[in-house]
Image (cartoon, rainbow, N blue to C red):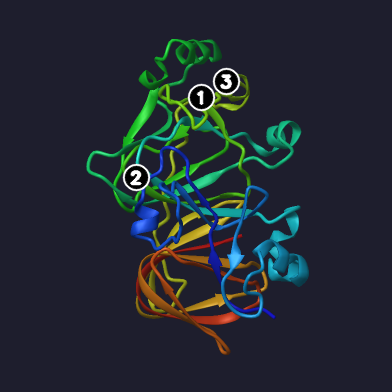
Amino acid sequence: MKYPMKLIAPLKDYLWGGTRLRDEYGKETQLTKVAESWELACHRDGKSVIANGAAAGWTLSDWLAEAGTDALGTRAAKFPYFPLLIKLIDAHDELSVQVHPNDDYALRVEGEYGKTELWYVVDAAPGAELLYGFAHEISKEEFRRRIEDNTLLNVVRHVPVQKGDVFFIPAGTLHAIGKGILICEIQQNSNTTYRIYDYGRIGADGKPRDLHIEKALDVTSLAPAPAYACGNEVDLFAGARARLLAACGYFTAYHLTVDGECVLTVSEDSFQCLTVLSGNVQLRTETDGLQLQKGESVFLPAGLGHCVLAGMGELILSKI
């Protein structure tokens, strides 16, 4: 049976994380830090668990294995496995400078697909910035040299950020989330990351964290990141203000602002995921009602039909 499925997210306690996802976004955990909450996850490194209804207690992966491909929609047929991974990320400190490979390289070297991703800045401390590509084109030889002599940060692009900013990050783009930034990330379902520079930090084992220099040299685009213009507001969801964040071959994402009632249609072409960034909303279908609050996500199987969102809040809607 298809119905709206509230998800319990696997949580990650990476050393750069903070406490906002636990304290402000309602993530129940004994972890001291919560760096990432994997809001929609069907990956070997973390799986969402269904919290409500007939499938409560199942992982979403197991339910999809029983429900079949119709629950994902026709657009997902081109993907050999579940296509998306959606996260909330609390960067209390800087993340490592890193890069993700494209599909061809990742399949050949890592045995999984690469990673193109989108960042929506949910919140940012005054003066917060992130790293996004290079300030100018450099050679592979200079790239290697600057990694070795710790001058890499001199040639990367430092971008000040504020709430509502959007960054599209194709595979191969050097990047890093800066401290004091909370992000909603929509990405390919991959956990392959090549760490280039890590500020000399020590991991939980008392040793410097591994770097992946040779692989990063293979896959990094040594040029400024391509210009990306976030879409304008679109009139697709009756009763809500909607802003198109990205539409690419891997995913489509919108930012919704609901104040009252909003009508959604989940057609046969794709499942949808709603992630609540602020406020409280009720999701209603013909047979079900579900209350959603800040920090919660819900999976809507393809073909679910018309849904109504009622209340006040900000959400990210993601689909294929």
At which x and y percent is residue 219? 61, 27
Precedes in sequence: disc 2 or disc 3: 2
Farthest bottom residue?
286
- Does residue 104 lie above or below 38 as drawn? above
| Residue 269 placement, left or right of 265 | right
Mark number, residue 123: none
Q: CA–CA distance between discs 2 and 3?
A: 26 Å
- Does residue 221 lie above or below 106 as drawn? above
Mark number, residue 213: 3
Q: Nearer the viewer, residue 11 or 89?
A: 11
Q: Quadrant of residue 255?
A: bottom left
Residue at the location (38% across, 61% down)? 25
Crowd class of label 2 (few under 14; some 14 to 19; many from 20; radius 10 Å): many
Crowd class of label 3 (few under 14; some 14 to 19; many from 20; radius 10 Å): some
Residue at the location (41% across, 14% down)? 150
Farthest left residue?
126
At which x and y percent is residue 146? 45, 13
Q: CA–CA distance between discs 1 and 3?
A: 6 Å
Q: In this figure, which residue is indicated by the disc labeled 1?
A: 196
Q: Amino acid at mark 3?
A: Ile
Q: CA–CA distance between discs 2 and 1?
A: 20 Å
Label 1 close to label 3 by CB (< 8 Å): yes
Q: Amino acid at mark 2?
A: Ile
Q: Nearer the viewer, residue 282 or 242?
A: 282
Precedes in sequence: disc 1 or disc 3: 1
Q: Secondary structure at mark 2?
A: strand
Q: In this figure, which residue is indicated by the disc labeled 2?
A: 181
Precedes in sequence: disc 2 or disc 1: 2
Q: Secondary structure at mark 1?
A: strand
At which x and y percent is residue 118? 49, 48
